[in-house]
Image (cartoon, rainbow, N blue to C red):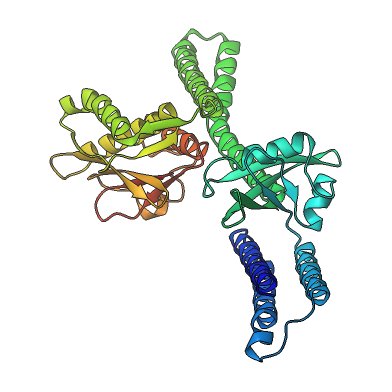
Amino acid sequence: MGSRRFWLGLFAQAVVFGCGAVAILAWRATLPANALLFAAAGAAAAVWLAGRVAGPEAAGKPEPEAPLENLERERARRTLQAFLDQAPTPLVTWRRGEPANAVNRAARRLFRTDDVLTGPAAELVAAALEGSADARRTVRLTEDGVARTYAISVADVVGAGSPLRLAALTDIEAEIQAAEAAALRELLQVLSHELMNSLTPLASLAHSAAEALADEDPADLPVVRKSVEVIARRAEGLHRFVEAYRRLARLPAPAPRRVSLAELLAEAGQLFETRWAPLGVRLELTPPKPDILIRIDPDLTAQALLGLMTNAAEAALAGTIAPPTVRLSAHASGEGAAITVEDNGPGVPQAQTADVFRPFFTTKPDGAGIGLSLARQAIVSQGGQLLLEPSEIGARFLIAF
């Protein structure tokens, strides 16, 4: 009897934990309705099963017969499975070295299986579930010949024998397509604006020069010569603009590895001082203490840092506070790290804060407007963020991994 009560109590804990884990995943996936559904199911299961475990003994009544226990246990299992099958988010479980398993109807439908995931999709999911539970994960799966992108939220289940990972797959294809469409519209607006600003006056100059040549009046030659010189300069400017766009579009894919953040900052500081110290710009470097080992692409991150520090040096030199100063620091932030680049320049006007990361937006007379855009792309491609934060003096940029 004690053995049966022990196993029923263990099953009660498993049911409550399972509902709680799924509720957490649903909440992380911004599915509050599903989270409430599983939370309510877990509470109901806890009350009902606790009554079955403690009730007979507390009331001084004999334990139910084993067949009745088995029947009620099976009924509870079916109830929990029914709740899981109502969730629209595919749920899978996975153990290291084993294939993933479909937990609910949505997962069985997505992977066309009753239990174990097989084939390339299973390999993709297993690969995505490697590493830390807090890592950001996406996987691209093909269903009925159509490829879709899923974000994966993960929870580690303890007390289930070997480590078990429970994952929820949220379809984010619509959000990705909307973001791509918005980015394309913005890019086309920028390109059309820049090209029209140059091509319209160039067309007018070319037309005037053609008319002057048609008259064959020697007195018009100086005007024609000047017009051709302007056309040549602007054509060269357009060429530089297109080359800048090509650089922006050809950023290499990240190759992450574990690196020392203190060493990365020290190297960036050394390169910075080589160029800017002779011009009077002071660098204040605050490495993380203790050092942070983080998995990032050191080359892309260093490129982004140097771009931010160069902008900061130029801003500090343009300011009125002496000496012009750039501050570079890093510290632990949750499971990751944060790097800040600050200056004591005039700062970013409030009206321009929404535009500073837009490709080709610049306030410098000879600027290409791709420095901050390149830096953000280099960081975002690694799963990080680059933000402009409020600052009382100068500008403050934050890189978060």
Q: Is residue 134 left or right of residue 127?
A: left
Q: Assign the N terminus to one quadrant of the image.
A: bottom right
Q: Is residue 340 above or below residue 267?
A: below
Q: Is residue 298 above or below residue 344?
A: above
Which residue is at the front of the view, 117 or 189? 117
Q: Is residue 162 left or right of residue 270?
A: right
Residue 239, image x and y in percent? 52, 20
Residue 320, image x and y in percent? 17, 44
| Residue at x 85%, y 46% (from the top left corner) | 112
Q: In which quarter of the view is residue 210 placed? A: top right
Residue 155, image x and y in percent? 58, 55
Q: Assign the C terminus to one quadrant of the image.
A: top left
Which residue is at the front of the view, 230 or 314? 314
Please indicate, yes or no, whether residue 185 appears anywhere in the rendered image: no
Which residue is at the front of the view, 223 or 175? 175
Which residue is at the front of the view, 170 or 206? 170
Residue 244, image x and y in percent? 49, 25
